[in-house]
Amino acid sequence: MKEKQLRIGMIGYGFMGRAHSNAYARVNQFFDLAYQPVLKAACARNVEAVQKFADNWGYESIESDWKALIARDDIDAIDICVPNNLHKEIALAAAAAGKIILCEKPLSMNAAEGIEMCEAVEKAGVANMVWYNYRRVPAVTLAKQIIDSGRLGKVFHYRANFLQDWTISEDVPQGGAALWRLDAAAAGSGVTGDLLAHCIDTAIWLNGGIRDVVAMTETFVKERVHADTGKAEPVGIDDACAFLCHFQNNSLGLFESTRYARGHKALYTFEINGEQGSLRWDLHDLHRLEFFDYNDEGATRGWRSIHVTDHGGEHPYMDHWWVPGLQIGYEHSFVHQVADFLKGLEDGKPAGPTFRDALETQRVCDAVLDSAKSREWKNVT
Amino acid sequence: MKEKQLRIGMIGYGFMGRAHSNAYARVNQFFDLAYQPVLKAACARNVEAVQKFADNWGYESIESDWKALIARDDIDAIDICVPNNLHKEIALAAAAAGKIILCEKPLSMNAAEGIEMCEAVEKAGVANMVWYNYRRVPAVTLAKQIIDSGRLGKVFHYRANFLQDWTISEDVPQGGAALWRLDAAAAGSGVTGDLLAHCIDTAIWLNGGIRDVVAMTETFVKERVHADTGKAEPVGIDDACAFLCHFQNNSLGLFESTRYARGHKALYTFEINGEQGSLRWDLHDLHRLEFFDYNDEGATRGWRSIHVTDHGGEHPYMDHWWVPGLQIGYEHSFVHQVADFLKGLEDGKPAGPTFRDALETQRVCDAVLDSAKSREWKNVT
Amino acid sequence: MKEKQLRIGMIGYGFMGRAHSNAYARVNQFFDLAYQPVLKAACARNVEAVQKFADNWGYESIESDWKALIARDDIDAIDICVPNNLHKEIALAAAAAGKIILCEKPLSMNAAEGIEMCEAVEKAGVANMVWYNYRRVPAVTLAKQIIDSGRLGKVFHYRANFLQDWTISEDVPQGGAALWRLDAAAAGSGVTGDLLAHCIDTAIWLNGGIRDVVAMTETFVKERVHADTGKAEPVGIDDACAFLCHFQNNSLGLFESTRYARGHKALYTFEINGEQGSLRWDLHDLHRLEFFDYNDEGATRGWRSIHVTDHGGEHPYMDHWWVPGLQIGYEHSFVHQVADFLKGLEDGKPAGPTFRDALETQRVCDAVLDSAKSREWKNVT
Amino acid sequence: MKEKQLRIGMIGYGFMGRAHSNAYARVNQFFDLAYQPVLKAACARNVEAVQKFADNWGYESIESDWKALIARDDIDAIDICVPNNLHKEIALAAAAAGKIILCEKPLSMNAAEGIEMCEAVEKAGVANMVWYNYRRVPAVTLAKQIIDSGRLGKVFHYRANFLQDWTISEDVPQGGAALWRLDAAAAGSGVTGDLLAHCIDTAIWLNGGIRDVVAMTETFVKERVHADTGKAEPVGIDDACAFLCHFQNNSLGLFESTRYARGHKALYTFEINGEQGSLRWDLHDLHRLEFFDYNDEGATRGWRSIHVTDHGGEHPYMDHWWVPGLQIGYEHSFVHQVADFLKGLEDGKPAGPTFRDALETQRVCDAVLDSAKSREWKNVT
């Protein structure tokens, strides 16, 4: 056991609860850190389910009321893994109680909520982070390194998409613990908040802020049975969303997300074209980064397929794992995020994206949804 | 020599003049047809250049004035391979003279011109075609066959882009014989008419008409030396253009083109997502079609990479060439288009895309350029 | 804590010690099993190093003498993660003490040793397994499922290679804790036992036994400084090895391994060609399996790229992890192997590959090395 | 018409007759050369078939007896496109008549025949070439340029294969005009002379001579109906062949060919691994070359996928065709070979591979077949 403990209170036990718990459990085995997360308590209304979850991951205790969890003295940090409509209330209470907060993305239902949340954590002076984990996929981190080195030169284009196909069937219901992402009341929006938010976070990180947008959304399946009522209810979320935009650096952006792209499971891709080079990445083969360097000699110029396990010793994450050629996966991005967060606590500069960083993504999402509704260009304000 | 001759009068001797001439020269060696093109005359103002071109390709004679060419009795068909701003005048004269017309794309500077051209050829009753050659790339033709078979089911998404990188340098001039594509006066528009027009033609062919659009254009390099004046002149074309749209079948479209995507030379790609399957194609590997069939058994479902040379005997073009595994290239699409056109003459139903088909693409281009200017959604009218 | 414990005594703390420890630590979080591994003790002569290792992974205690470890009553299973020349002695002692044995591959220095080891564990009646982990990479497991389903038909060809590039520099020393793989006295052979053994194990599993072989080996760097003596010593291992073979099912085999293939880090690939279909796999993109099904309709036949995360519910491992599209990595193969081993203990049929299975690979390795030396075809006996 | 004519007498009208004729017809339209091929006469016993062939390609006349063709004064060069067992007799007669000879590969049935042929053309002092066309696939030519530049450094490994699947069915007959490649009496061998000969020619060109070999062949289908007798006859050819070898530069070679690799149509691939870099090529995507340059900076090292159309101006063939991104295909390799041959005539140094060059490949094929028969290593003599 490390000297310094970060005692975690986890709220939620779904997909993200698993991903975060796994990260807490593994981080100290692969990263040399002063801090160590301790799985103190898991919390959810469904006592049986949360007990099973706690047993599986080694949480020492459970709570059925998140307010009780926040009230506990033996908890340092609250991890919010519940539907989006609950983020704000919990975050405000946790901040008021002086807890560190690690909040699942998107930060909030909208920018207005996000502002309240930022103000709360900043006023309370508590470390805070939002789980935009894709920044810490090693190939994405390498993209950031290359961009920061200036090797791309002036940027002209940024394009990203996030394509899935799991809601094509009209028989998929909405709502409930499993499918709250299809319920506008719980999720706020559909693919915009769930998937494009990831693309936007990465884009801002890599290419700076977004100035204005024009968007189009669509709901292909108009009614789905709701888990709460058992009846067909109108679907309020966007099944698909695409938008054009200008970045603050004057490059052009193109974003698209859908859950109706047959054959794609989680095809998050981005590409950035600069005067001197270009980069491409694809979540389906997340351990590779494609890089075109115009400064390579003419006859042998080509897109380089970089297997990020062959990192040459300069990568912040890869030498903590296995040997070149042996790939890591999705879950490792969370381990890296925890590692950076813990290192940040040690250094007094908790790693981002902070609530404030994530608010910027929220503003873009708001502008996108507004634009889709009004069929007008909207500034990101 | 075949019994029936199609005596060609070619206007222009540039890149497309070569591509078309090559197609005329080869078509009867690979396709069994009643008609045979005869390279009767090549025409251009630059006598020396056109004589060299004629010698190279075996044109029997030259002309320096296209009106003289059109006036000749020994010419059956006029092939228009000149800058866009000349298409209309030549086409109107050729139609009036009762000539068959094969016009390089885009049809015209705008839809208004295109309407005049359609009316002229229809009134004259002359066979007419526009060289949207990508329909006849074998993998694209296969895509059409699969779509027409119904195997994709209801379509949700269509996306296409055409990415190049050849005008990034500010030192590239505009205008003149070589670079008229950068001169708005000659080209009408930039990537919209040059590249997106291809994407739109294919899209309409594969997925039907487009209802409305919202677009964004950009001119990254604001001034370039003009070949005519030798001075820096404002650049009037769009260097990049992206647009969102709705198709008439209610699927969503996303299109992008640029000449500032470092690392891409002629990356024309499209993807179409339907309820039961998806297709993808990429001009950089034009002999392959990617196909995802949701009806494949679950555990072994995957994107199929179809090497179109392995056609199983049902393809209209592939069994005319070599054996499975041995790929053909870009130029063959023109041979196929000539083959179909000649077969159409024989059958009395000249193959498309006709002027009327190409006018539809022109209408979309107009709406795109209008939308980019006004920053508003525009209907395709 | 599960009812049934499997108390592990780990010998060694290197790369494989980490991989196995990670598997023990994670298996119960992702697989529902009666048994749970308990990290009881780690053992190595270097007390400081093994203490650090034990602290990192949570081993309760350490030992500096493997005989003491084997003598402990609170250990159920010995995990042998030491150089190959120590496998036999430890395994014989552990078997004699009635311990379960999980032995790193290759089983032994040669088949003669392997026979002794098989006889020892069989006589003692202890469960035993060799860590040929690649069988449990999900895409490889899927390959096995497809082959067993008969969809490939009669097999004609099997080819595999394992290409690396890490010993090209003459400055890499041999011997010692880190580089014993380059020291023939510790490793027995070079790429044959280290890398081809993996290829052979998978091949036998997928395609049955090997009848005869003809092989070629090479040692490109003839002398390397030895860590023990500090002096340049002759290199006794094979830097590269290739062999041809006949399988018992009359298919032809082709195998190659080297540590001198610049650009390849751990490029383990195999391909199998049958009358009705073919399969390909590549460790550098381990989450994909390529499948060609001749029974697909002609015009749309193509190699399918199966992203194994999209498993359709029939896969033994994939539904234990994340959601479709989100890939897992190298280390997970060890988790799967432990899961199967524990399930096997529960069911009374411990999962393979057993020592007896691994002996078959040893026999092939012996024949390969004999053939390379004698320049003659050799039967596998 | 160019000043200097090369009047061609073509013997044969099959697949290769088409490929060569196409090359003669096109070469002057794309390459600026002093010489121009003139299609003077086509020759075959089947008068009807050869007349149709001559009409299609524009041969001015036909002959039904190759001796009559060789006797004609108006023929400068004989192109031998007939089964292998006829090469020697025709070549000897053509050389005696002072004709230039362009002979389809492989040169001969065996090295003994090849020696006679070399001596004949050298004695007669006639220009001679063998159609190993793959040297002139632009990506392969680029590979040669990179190797010759020294960028790979010392070579360790060369591997190549040529995989097809067209003879898997037992119903495919042997012999006759169409399937003489399956008839040992006409072809000499199976995949060794037909496919591996290509791999060997390229290998020698890129990596130098081969010292010794050990090989394995297999005939999967033992009897096929013969076109001449209409009865099932034993199959004398090798359906598959694999061999290991040492090159004279001490690198290791691995070659394999088969017509039983389901899913592969003409998968000719090679890879070469040197100390400083590696190259890979694949006929199924022939316009790409993969290049790994170890001298790229560590963190961004990766295999470059070079689209050979983007040649940077230094390529001997690519700037004769279209623009970057627009690929050419299989048939163009023959155009390049004719272009080089004609340029060589102009310069007085006819381009290779000459008969003498091709004889070296024949010697390797002989050693391979001998080794397969005797199950022993054989020197290439």
Image: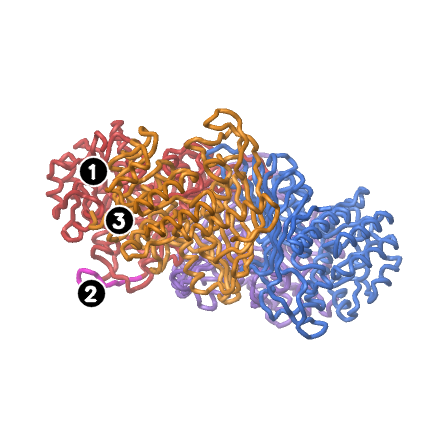
Chain colours: A purple, B red, C blue, D orange
Q: Main secondary structure of the magenta part?
A: loop
Q: Are marks 1 and 3 in contact (CB under 8 Å)?
A: no
Using the numbered discs, state the Cα–Cα distance from disc 1 to disc 2 in whole angstroms: 43 Å
Magenta stretch, residue numbers = B221-230
In the depicted structure, whether residue D113 falls above or below residue A340: above
Give the residue type at disc 2.
Lys
Quadrant the C terminus of chain A occupies: bottom left
Tell me which label, 1 or 2, sits earlier in the chain: 1
B74 vs C103, left or right, is left
Please give the residue where the numbered disc 2 appears in the rendered image.
B231
Using the numbered discs, state the Cα–Cα distance from disc 1 to disc 3 in whole angstroms: 18 Å
Please give the residue where the numbered disc 1 appears in the rendered image.
B38
At numbered mark 3, what does the secondary structure look like: helix, strand or loop?
Answer: helix
The mark lying in front, picked from 1 and 3, is 3
Same chain for the residues under marks 1 and 2 in the image: yes
Q: Position of residue A37 (x, y in %)?
A: 70, 63
Q: Residue at x 52, y 39 (%)?
A: D259
Q: Position of residue C49 (x, y in %)?
A: 75, 69
Q: Position of residue D41 (x, y in %)?
A: 27, 38
Neighbours of disc 2 within 10 Å: few (<14), some (14-19), many (20+): few
The label number, if any, that marks residue D28 in the structure image = 3
A69 vs D151, left or right, is right
